[in-house]
Amino acid sequence: MKTTTLHVDRRVLEKYNQPGPRYTSYPTAPHFTGDFDAQSFIREMEASNRPGTEMSDVSLYFHFPFCHSLCYFCACNMVITHNMERVERYVRYLKKEIELIASHIHPDRRVVQMHWGGGTPTYLTPEQSRSVFEHIRNHFNFAADAEISIEIDPRTIRDDHLSVLRESGFNRVSFGVQDFNPRVQKEVNRIQTYEQNAFVIEESRRLKFDSVNVDLMYGLPHQTEASYKETLDQIIAFSPDRLAVFNYAHVPWLKKHQAILPEAAMPGTRERLGILKLAIEELTAAGYVYIGMDHFARPEDELSVALAGRTLHRNFQGYSTRADSEIYAMGVSSISQLKNAYAQNLKSIKEYERRLDEGLPATQIGVRLTPEDQLRRYVINEIMCNNRLLKADVEERFQLDFDRHFEAVLPELDVFVEDGLLSVHTDRLEVPDAGRLVVRNIAMVFDAYLKEDMRKPNPTYSRTV
Ligand code: SF4
């Protein structure tokens, strides 16, 4: 795929910088409720796995919540501990959950993707990881070319950790750097040396992992455009296959430890937008393809190929090339995405264990999609991932007249058209390069729940750009 430097108009970023969902699901997570329980999840799994129905491939997600120390910016569901017995116990329960969920999945269904996230999945010793993976393999049917990825922590892995993971079958690694600047690292309590990062990159290449992903973050204390440029230069020199550049969401009312971070030292809106502009322009100039939202990939990467072929999809792990697979997620707080439903597991480890002792899925909340949700999920996905929406395609899939169905909201697209961020044709909507920075805003027009969400007192969503 051809790469071109994407030039960012700062005024567009400023104008469209408003709170909005990231659309890793639709309906979004705030619409999951306790009305959807373990029995509802069982019913959905049965419906998806009934012999005679059309069965898609399967993606698996596993959540490992443990971490050695607290990064003050963290928004993940994690537990800081130094007690390996807790980890051993969690592994036992996770294996129980694997058996339970696998018993509902038709044995012919192929696993085409698996991801271990956290927390810190490499908190498990290499031996524990191997044992969990073997258990998974014994209960699921993996495709030979399955994409198998894991998040690692370069600060705490053993020297042989990556080679054991590679031997077990992992073929992709991902790790967070956030920022190379020592002052930023100290303030956020995540000291990660250049050597630790270099070791992971070099070792992954030596072991022939198919892909290395690195996460950066902007909006942290003491970051400036100048300091961030140094971080970008260093990361470009490492040349990872994929990069994510996340916007730090400061929500101390939800994540109390974030209050430790000095707000006065955080970059203001102008500086933040400047950093974002810099990141997009530097990375695309260095040959990365801007996939969308916060993601970049090398031109030969599957994500770039899927973007060019308009087959990209979004799920809870971000962008995905496995559009049609259902996600079965295990471990505390993990979210499954089935054909007609989302289901999130209990967040408390104690309650998670209690539920599995009862022999039931650990579902806490979820939502079953209505036909209208299905339609809007499709429309939002096309805009967010594929930058184009063919009206005839929507009409054929959902048996309706597009213009008539969305009559009430279509005028809300005019502002994007006037700013050159969208073109509306009789047969399609098309997002040009300039509009790709605001796809979230365009997608928001088709979100049936958003107006009500925005009336709530505390912001439900972070800013869009
Ligand atoms: S290692 Fe990751 S999950 Fe753990 S505290 Fe740091 S950011 Fe959060």
Image (cartoon, helix red, strand yellow):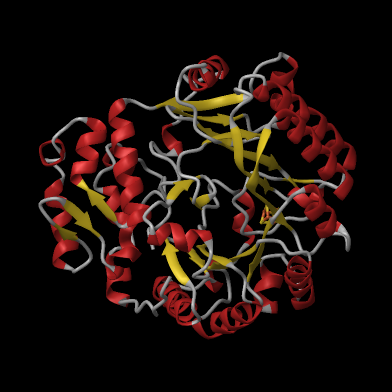
Q: Quadrant of ligand 1?
A: bottom right
**Residue 311's spot in the image, x, y percent?**
40, 51
Horizontal and vertical percent for residue 439?
A: 32, 58
> Which quarter of the picture shows residue 307?
bottom left
Q: Quadrant of residue 106?
A: top right
What residue lies at 37% left-to-right and 43% top-to-bottom? 457
**Image vertical order of residue 9 relative to residue 450, above or below:** below
Viewer-proximal residue among 93 and 354: 93
Give above or below for 178 relative to 113.
below
- Relative placement, left or right, of 389 versus 319 is left
Residue 248 in view in this figure: no
Q: Is residue 293 left or right of residue 193?
A: left
Confirm whether residue 173 shows in the render.
yes
Is residue 49 shown left or right of residue 71? left
Q: Which residue: 45% across, 70% down?
A: 289
**Where residue 56 appears, x then y in whole percent?**
49, 32
Q: Is 258 on the left-hand or right-hand side of 391?
A: right
- Residue 372 in the image: above or below residue 232: above
Query: Which residue lies at the image location 29% right of the left edge and 48% below the top edge?
Result: 444
312 or 32: which is nearer to us?
A: 312
Residue in the foreground of this view, choosing between 264 and 286 = 286
Say above or below: 132 vs 41. below
Residue 14 appears in which quarter of the rendering? bottom left
Q: Identify which residue is drawn at 42% across, 27% down.
A: 340
